[in-house]
Amino acid sequence: EKMQSGIAELDALMGGGIERGSSTLIVGAAGTGKSTLAAQYCAAAAERGQGSAMFLFDETITSLTSRADGLGIPLRRHIDSRIIAIHQIDPAELSPGEFVHKIRDAVERDHAAIVVIDSLNGYLNAMPGERFLTIQLHELLMYLAQHGVATILIGAHQGLIGAQMNTPVDASYLADAVVLLRYYEARGEVRQAISIVKKRGSAHERTIREFRLQDGIHLGEPLRDFRGILTGSPIYDPADPTKKETQR
């Protein structure tokens, strides 16, 4: 079963949606819209009557819901109706075992169809005294897959723009799909782009599309007239020679 986001262009990019029983890693720099994208999937699932559980390590519930309100994502309404549960995690008060127990409650007791961990950086880095956290994460993803839960993991890149972007927590090999959000500069503006760099089990678009957060989530047409977008400094390179004349 594919779980759609409610945004036609995003669902087309994802090959129809994210599959139940799969894990999706959304990775990008700060402010690119990773948490907002996860919230959109949860809100769309709630509209279908499917529950979700979001576990926040890096931001408050208030900031997430306020941002969702500004973009027209009905997250707050579904929280009030208890179809979406948001848990703000304080790692100083919660052990890895207790965190896993909360996720199991969300799945087995509350029947969550989507589980969001925001973010992996917070989960792995906030518990430095614990060993084998990556192995525990792998076992957690296997458990969620066996229960048909779609898992969304948020990973933050270090830095904002440029070719040397990296993440201190590399979980791309664990995830079934990887969504990449990047900043890039074009014509004196800082813009954002979205692409799917990995998706097991089904076909997906390999295009890079513009990604905008303004009165909602919007995806533009594929950025075919640029090359080097993922470096952060693309070059205008249209395939149609007439466009070069127009650009001049």
Image: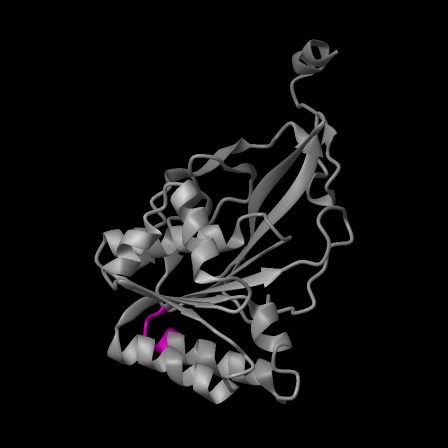
What colour-coding does the image apply?
one colour
Q: Residue 101: x and y, percent?
A: 39, 85
Q: For residue 20, which quarter of the picture?
A: bottom left
Q: Which residues are magenta?
A: 145-149
> Image point 60% across, 40% down: which residue?
192
Q: Which residue lies most toward the front here?
A: 62
> Image point 40% across, 57% down: which residue?
18
Residue 89 visible in image: yes
Above or below 233: residue 158: below
Label count reads: 0
Q: Residue 33: x and y, percent?
A: 53, 49
Residue nearest the observer in this picture, 28 or 129? 129
Q: Is residue 83 magenta?
A: no
Residue 173 visible in image: no
Magenta region, mostly helix, strand or loop? loop
> Image point 59% across, 49% down: which residue?
31
Q: On the rendered image, what quadrant is the C terminus found in? A: top right
Q: Is residue 148 magenta?
A: yes
Above or below 230: residue 117: below
Q: Residue 44: x and y, percent?
A: 31, 51
> Image point 47% across, 51% down: which residue?
36
Left or right? Give the position of 151 relative to 225.
left
Above or below 42: residue 242: above
Q: On the rendered image, what quadrant is the N terminus found in? A: bottom left
Above or below 138: residue 38: above
Q: Residue 87: x and y, percent?
A: 40, 70
